Image: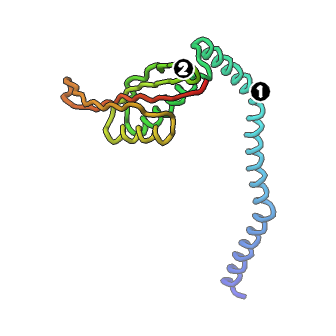
Amino acid sequence: MNNQQKNIGLLIGFLVCGFIVYQLAIKKTIAAKNKHEQLLIEKNLVDNAGSKIEYLNQKNGNLNSFLVSNNLSIDNSFQQMLLEKINVFANKENIKIVAFNKPHIIEGAQTVVETYSFKLKGGFVGLLKLINYIEQQRLGALISIDFEKKKNYKTRRDYLTVNIFLQKIKNN
């Protein structure tokens, strides 16, 4: 064997030994290190669980006192849900909520009719998409939709507003 063959044999032997060492020792060490780091993260989460529970209970108490002080209850949840849905959609379509009035409630013998009125400002297509969204969600009956073109004299631009009246009928 000449020197070149000896060097090639030495290189191949070194690579085979390196591969065997990696498979038997280094690979398992890296896996154990990763598992150890994951377990440390989980341990920290478990250690902080008590303080998080205490914080969430305190926050829950604060929210309950806020609901009681503002006289909010489950009966008001439809109005809140309606406002939330309109707000989420309005953010997507670049629509501004100008006014969201308190519901007008008419109590009959067996039914309660709630009429929600709100005013929005935005582009025609976006407002139509919002009206369609409200209809598709079946939140109530749209009894009146009033588009109005207005002019801002300071900026000399026209803008579009819409007054929407949504009616919901509940049984007593």
Q: Which image quarter holds the C terminus?
A: top right
Relative to the observer, which residue lies in front, 109 or 22?
Answer: 109
Position above or below: 14 against 107: below
In-image side of 44 versus 157 (left or right)? right
Measured as percent of width and height from the top left, residue 57 is found at 71, 22
Residue in view at x 45 percent, y 29 percent: 166
Q: Which image quarter holds the N terminus?
A: bottom right
> Disc 2 designates what residue?
108
Relative to the observer, which residue lies in front, 114 or 75?
Answer: 114
* Kind of residue indicated by mark 1: Gly
Answer whether labels 2 and 1 touch (C-beta < 8 Å).
Answer: no
Which mark, residue 96?
Answer: none
Relative to the observer, which residue lies in front, 17 or 70?
Answer: 70
Circle 2 residues within 10 Å: few <14, some 14–19, many ≥20: few
Circle 1 residues within 10 Å: few <14, some 14–19, many ≥20: few
> Disc 1 designates what residue?
50
Measured as percent of width and height from the top left, residue 101 is found at 43, 20
Measured as percent of width and height from the top left, residue 110 is found at 59, 23
